[in-house]
Image (cartoon, helix red, strand yellow):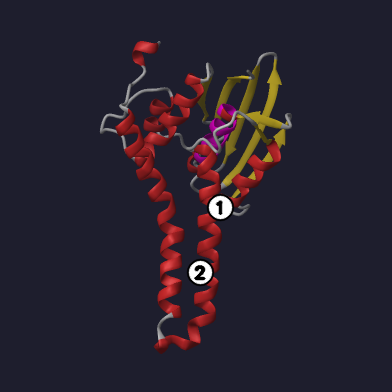
Amino acid sequence: MSENITKLTAADLAALLCARICHDLVGPVSALETGLDLLNDDDNLDMHDDAIELIKIGAEQASAKLQFLRIAFGAGGSAPTIIAAAELERLSRGVYPDGKVTFDWNMGVDGLNKPAARVLLNLVMLSVQSIPLGGTVAVSAKIDGAQIDISLLCKGKKARLDPAIAKTLAGGAPQDGFSGRTIQPFYTGMIAREAGGTVSSTVETEGEAIIFGAQIPTA
């Protein structure tokens, strides 16, 4: 199967991941900028309270996304470690608070090693994208022998798995080339494979559900 896995240069991978990170931070940073503009506009003194609230929201969102992406895309610290399940839930809820999408966390482990933690957070991102009209995401993880089994069951009206996402998650290349959107699932699969594990995606059309799964060695 290895011959079917797309290879990217380190420079291309870094550039595409940076593009994705910048895309995810545009919203909260723009909110900060707009709030500061209003705050510095003497012609809109009556909107200063709104400006401060906008700055607060933008700062909170930027902080939540940076903390999340630090683990999902980065090393999250250089030393090998176990990341607590409660921390992974906190990071996810910080970026995706219950609203249009509701999470049901059922972790059968106290924590995950770095590869498993990074895969899980990246699958959280893909799960939210798969139910654009909202719904629920049931997140679970358990130890099965020498591996960690991760599962995310996504249910919602018109749940959809983009073929390009499924293809890149499996290590393939999209027909129109990689973008910030498709590099993220590709990177997710890369993390799993380099850890000696696997990652998968399944569509259940009758139940309007998408299932993302991963198996990562505990060592």
User: What secondary structure is found at the residue carrying circle 1?
Assistant: helix
Give residue 172's quadrant in the image: top left
Residue 16 visible in the snapshot: yes
Q: Position of residue 33 (x, y in %)?
A: 41, 68
SS at mark 2 in the image: helix
Residue designated by label 1 = 64
Asked if residue 206 can be seen in this view, the reply is no
* Left or right of residue 24, residue 156 in this image: right
Is the stretch drawn in magenta largely helix, strand or loop?
Answer: helix
Query: Is 121 one of the magenta-colored residues?
Result: yes
Q: Is residue 126 magenta?
A: no
Residue 143 position in % (x across, y down): 70, 21
Give the residue type at disc 2: Ile
Q: Residues within 10 Å of mark 1 (few under 14, many from 20)?
A: many
Task: Note whether 99 is above or below 68 in the view shown.
Answer: below
Which mark, by number, is residue 127? Answer: none
User: Which residue shows up at 43% across the image and 27% down it?
Assistant: 169
Residue occupying image coordinates x 39% and y 44%: 20
Going from N to C along the chain, the mark reached first, 2 or 1, is 2
Q: Which residue is tagged 2? A: 55
Q: In which quadrant of the rendered view does residue 40 lie?
A: bottom left
| Location of residue 92 with respect to 201 vertically, above or below | below
Q: Amino acid at mark 1?
A: Ala
Instruction: Pinpoint residue 116: horizontal percent, then vertical percent.
Output: 59, 28
The residues bearing labels 2 and 1 have C-alpha atoms spaced at a distance of 14 Å
Residue range (magenta): 115-125
User: Left or right: 157 with respect to 43?
Assistant: right
Q: Quadrant of the N terminus?
A: top left
Pick the front one: 154 or 169: 169
- Residue 215 image point, x, y percent: 58, 20
